[in-house]
Image (spheres, helix red, strand yellow):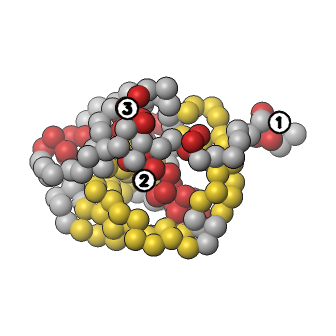
């Protein structure tokens, strides 16, 4: 395993639509392992393949509350969303900045695992937000393109 460099929002790779994964092989497994290590090291909640320069439909989400529980989503589809939440959102590719974004409160995703088997996962609040945020990355959308505005330092610090 190895840490991968996280691209910033100025990189053109983050603004391209990703291609589906067709080979569930050792190359994919290495990417997934590296992404998991990179996500844990970064302290983030989610990481999409284009953020590390790979234009494939892959993202990871840390769904653990007390300990890391990294779930791999390959060729994901959002099956269902419900409700609405509006609040601060950040991104590992936009370090140190947070914007106000409207997202569904709940999201249900269907995806393949590292061996190509289909599964479903669902989440509310932060996880629902994360599913939608990471899915946007696969379509070349960075949250700064869908936010209302950046939060000020005063708002972030509670002043």
Mark closest to the chain's N terminus, 2 or 3:
3
Q: Tell me the CA gap for discs 1 and 3.
A: 32 Å
Identify the residue shown where x is 29% and y is 32%.
2
Q: Tell me the CA gap for discs 2 and 1.
A: 30 Å
Q: Secondary structure at mark 3?
A: helix
Residue 69 visible in this rendered orientation of the protein: yes
Q: Position of residue 153 (x, y in %)?
A: 78, 33
Identify the residue shown where x is 51% and y is 70%.
81
Identify the residue shown where x is 57% and y is 65%.
104
> According to the image, label 1 marks what residue?
154
Q: Position of residue 33 (x, y in %)?
A: 27, 43
Q: In this rendering, which labeled residue sits more in front, label 1 or label 3? A: 3
Q: Residues within 10 Å of mark 3 (few under 14, many from 20)?
A: some
Q: Nearer the viewer, residue 129 or 103?
A: 103
Pointers 1 and 3 in contact (C-beta within 8 Å):
no
Quadrant assignment, res 158:
top right
Q: In this rendering, which labeled residue sits more in front, label 2 or label 1? A: 2
> According to the image, label 3 marks what residue?
13
Mark closest to the chain's N terminus, 2 or 1:
2
Q: Residues within 10 Å of mark 1 (few under 14, many from 20)?
A: few
Mark closest to the chain's N terminus, 1 or 3:
3
């Amino acid at each position: 395993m190895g840490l991968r460099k996280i691209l910033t929002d100025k990189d053109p790779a983050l603004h391209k639509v990703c291609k589906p994964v067709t080979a569930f092989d050792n190359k994919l497994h290495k990417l997934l392992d590296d992404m998991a290590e990179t996500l844990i090291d970064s302290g983030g909640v989610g990481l999409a393949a284009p953020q590390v320069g790979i234009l494939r439909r892959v993202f990871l989400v840390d769904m653990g509350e007390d300990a890391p529980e990294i779930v791999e989503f390959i060729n994901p589809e959002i099956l269902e969303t419900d409700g609405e939440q509006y609040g601060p959102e950040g991104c590992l590719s936009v370090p140190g900045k947070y914007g106000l974004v409207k997202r569904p409160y709940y999201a249900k995703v269907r995806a393949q695992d590292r061996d190509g088997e289909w599964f479903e996962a669902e989440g509310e609040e932060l996880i629902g937000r994360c599913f939608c945020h990471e899915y946007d990355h696969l379509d070349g959308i960075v949250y700064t393109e869908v936010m209302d505005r950046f939060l000020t330092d005063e708002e972030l610090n509670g002043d």
